[in-house]
Image (tube, rainbow, N blue to C red):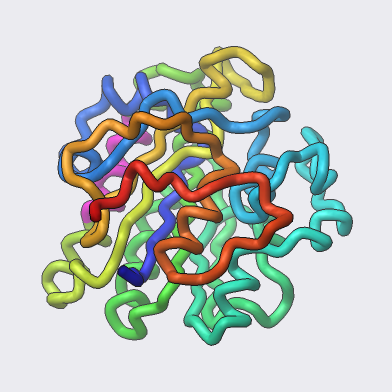
Amino acid sequence: MKSKVILTIIDGCRPDGLAQANTPNIDSLWQNGSYSWTAQTVMPSVTLPVHNSMFRGISPQKHGVGADNIYQPSASAFPSMIDLAFNSGLHTAMFYSWGQLRDLASPGKLRQSYLRESIYGQDNDTHIAEVAADYIVQYQPDLTVLYLGDVDIFGHLSGWMSPDYISAIEANDRAIGHVVKTLTDAGIRDQFTIIVLSDHGGHDNNHGTEMPEDMTIIWMLNGPVIKRGHVIQTPVGIRDTASTIMHLLDLPRPEVWEGQPVYDAFSG
């Protein structure tokens, strides 16, 4: 059941924001895959601590990265899924627009690392997705991370659920659609499970609280071993992401991780 994985992270995307936006490409993924609109992130609901929980399968209280968005060396005591995949001989790649995410992988554990720092108020994600799509087709990595940051940026600039915020979600949908189309045109789409999730939500012009608007995230999978049109019945948390990816890559899950594979999403 091994599958290559593309983990696509839409920073700051609320489920009700996705529902309000015109997103035919993302809609096709969840309508033909497995999904949850009630998945939960961790506190503090801030990008860097959440990403360390997403990649290391543990709570911020354990990895030590806090609401100040500053990486702490204590996190390296807990293995990142990127490191585990690379150490198992798999091809890892990451495309992102926020430099603080670089510590999600230890030095030398990414075969490809592409960073172009975001410029506030501009469309940064289209370029990131185009570069990622070309690389995936050429090299077909086993684990690709695609980080899209514009939705969060426009949440801070214009407010969560504002017209600019909704437009940013729609731009991300087109970017994700470009990736899917590029893989489809190359005849390799069926080799990949695409995961689309958000790290946190937001309210007004900020996030980081325990409010449902901040804590509730999108979480979906679409791929050859995933149930189609299935609402995930079990609770889903951001810490389950790494374990689910290890299951897709047919790699063992570290016992130190708190998250578990979301088995209900899998067919067979």
Viewer-side residue, 174 vs 72: 72
Query: Image quadrant of residue 100?
Result: bottom right
- The reply to whether residue 201 is in sight is yes
| Residue closest to the far front | 268
Viewer-side residue, 191 vs 103: 191
Q: Tell me which segment is drawn in magenta.
A: 167-177
| Image position of 13 (left or right of 175) | right
| Image position of 32 (left or right of 1) | left
Q: Position of residue 255 (x, y in %)?
A: 69, 58
Q: Position of residue 83 (x, y in %)?
A: 64, 72
Query: Image quadrant of residue 253?
Result: bottom right
Q: Position of residue 244 (x, y in %)?
A: 47, 54
Rendered view: 94 above or below 122: below
Q: How many marks?
A: 0
- The reply to whether residue 102 is in sight is no
| Quadrant in the picture for the C terminus | bottom left
Residue 171 in magenta? yes
| Image position of 209 (left or right of 193) | right
Residue 132 in magenta? no
Residue drawn at the location 36% of the way across and 84% of the way down: 139
Residue drawn at the location 52% of the way across and 16% of the way down: 213
Rendered view: 235 above or below 258: above
Viewer-side residue, 76 vs 25: 76
Rendered view: 2 above or below 16: below
Residue drawn at the location 60% of the way across and 13% of the way down: 211
Q: Position of residue 73 (x, y in %)?
A: 87, 58
Kindly report the secondary structure that dominates the magenta region of the rendered protein.
helix
| Quadrant in the picture for the N terminus | bottom left
| Image position of 193 (left or right of 224) | right
Residue drawn at the location 55% of the way across and 74% of the way down: 85
Rendered view: 252 above or below 211: below
